[in-house]
Image: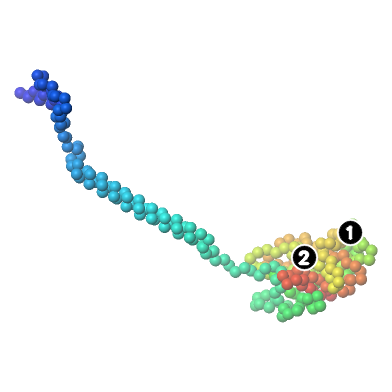
């Protein structure tokens, strides 16, 4: 036979019927103390809370120190990173170099010295390395009026008292790591007093114009002509010049 269920326990502060009302100011019965559902005593719970607080404070302290150290390193190392190593720069264009190292194109044993000055130009038929190019004068036509008119009848004759002069050049590129443009090399002529640049000429269309040469690479050779319009009285004393880092470099004309 099953037992009847136990009567529910009275709620806190329950006063059975007939019990006199407590006097004002009397203490009410203390509520029944119930243990924490986890089974942890209040002292243990307090210790855990204090330990957790201490661990949090220590972690925050060390994280803050680490952040300050990183910030200090970052601010103190700004601008002190060493640049990455680079290959040594190649010889810049326009720097006069005689054709002497092993493997250089043949036909020269010249020393730098004063060679290439207007009074001591590169000899006719002598190639010379100028920066990334080897330049050689092949020939000259001191009165090129007929040659220009034959090539293009619409070419204008030279102004009175002047002549068109054609200079034939061979240009070779010397850098194995790039391309060269012979047409971009500046050329001019001088008699020691005046100077006349090719881009100022009034020659018209030029047969085998060096300016029309495309890009060339190491081992290639471009042969072409450059035209100048100069006073007739200066034609016999002309030397051909181009620019270098040390100033104009001069070639003798045949």
* Residue at figure coordinates x 47%, y 57% from the top left: 74
Q: CA distance from mark 1 to mark 2?
A: 23 Å
Percent position (x, y) of residue 209? 80, 62
Which quarter shows the C terminus? Answer: bottom right
Q: Quadrant of residue 14?
A: top left
Give the residue at the far top of this rendering. Answer: 18
Residue corresponding to mark 2: 186
The mark that comes first in sequence, 1 or 2, is 1
Q: Residues within 10 Å of mark 1 (few under 14, many from 20)?
A: some
Q: Quadrant of residue 142?
A: bottom right
Viewer-proximal residue among 51 and 164: 51
* Residue at figure coordinates x 91%, y 69% from the top left: 232
Note whether 38 is above or below 81 in the view shown. Answer: above
* Residue at figure coordinates x 84%, y 66% from the top left: 196
Percent position (x, y) of residue 84? 54, 64
Residue 88 relative to residue 74: left or right: right
Q: Is residue 52 visible?
A: yes
Residue corresponding to mark 1: 155
Q: Secondary structure at mark 2?
A: loop
Viewer-proximal residue among 241 and 181: 241
Pointer 1 with pointer 2, Cβ within 8 A = no
Q: Secondary structure at mark 1?
A: loop
């Amino acid at each position: 036979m099953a037992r009847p269920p136990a009567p529910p326990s009275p709620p806190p502060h329950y006063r059975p019927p007939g019990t006199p009302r407590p006097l004002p100011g009397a203490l009410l019965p203390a509520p029944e103390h119930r243990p924490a559902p986890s089974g942890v005593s209040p002292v243990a719970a307090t210790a855990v809370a204090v330990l957790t607080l201490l661990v949090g404070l220590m972690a925050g302290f060390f994280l803050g120190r680490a952040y300050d150290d990183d910030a200090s390193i970052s601010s103190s190392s700004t601008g002190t990173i060493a640049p990455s190593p680079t290959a040594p720069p190649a010889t810049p264009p326009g720097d006069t170099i005689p054709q002497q190292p092993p493997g250089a194109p043949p036909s020269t044993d010249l020393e730098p010295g004063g060679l290439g000055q207007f009074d001591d130009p590169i000899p006719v038929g002598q190639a010379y390395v100028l920066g990334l190019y080897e330049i050689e004068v092949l020939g000259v036509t001191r009165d090129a009026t007929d040659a220009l008119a034959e090539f293009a009848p619409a070419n204008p004759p030279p102004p009175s008292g002047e002549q068109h002069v054609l200079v034939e050049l061979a240009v070779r590129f010397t850098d194995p790591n790039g391309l060269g443009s012979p047409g971009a090399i500046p050329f001019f002529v001088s008699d020691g007093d005046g100077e006349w640049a090719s881009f100022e000429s009034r020659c018209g269309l030029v047969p085998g114009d060096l300016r029309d040469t495309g890009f060339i690479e190491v081992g290639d050779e471009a042969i072409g002509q450059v035209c100048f319009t100069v006073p007739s009285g200066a034609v016999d004393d002309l030397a051909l010049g181009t620019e270098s880092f040390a100033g104009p470099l001069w070639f003798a004309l045949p």
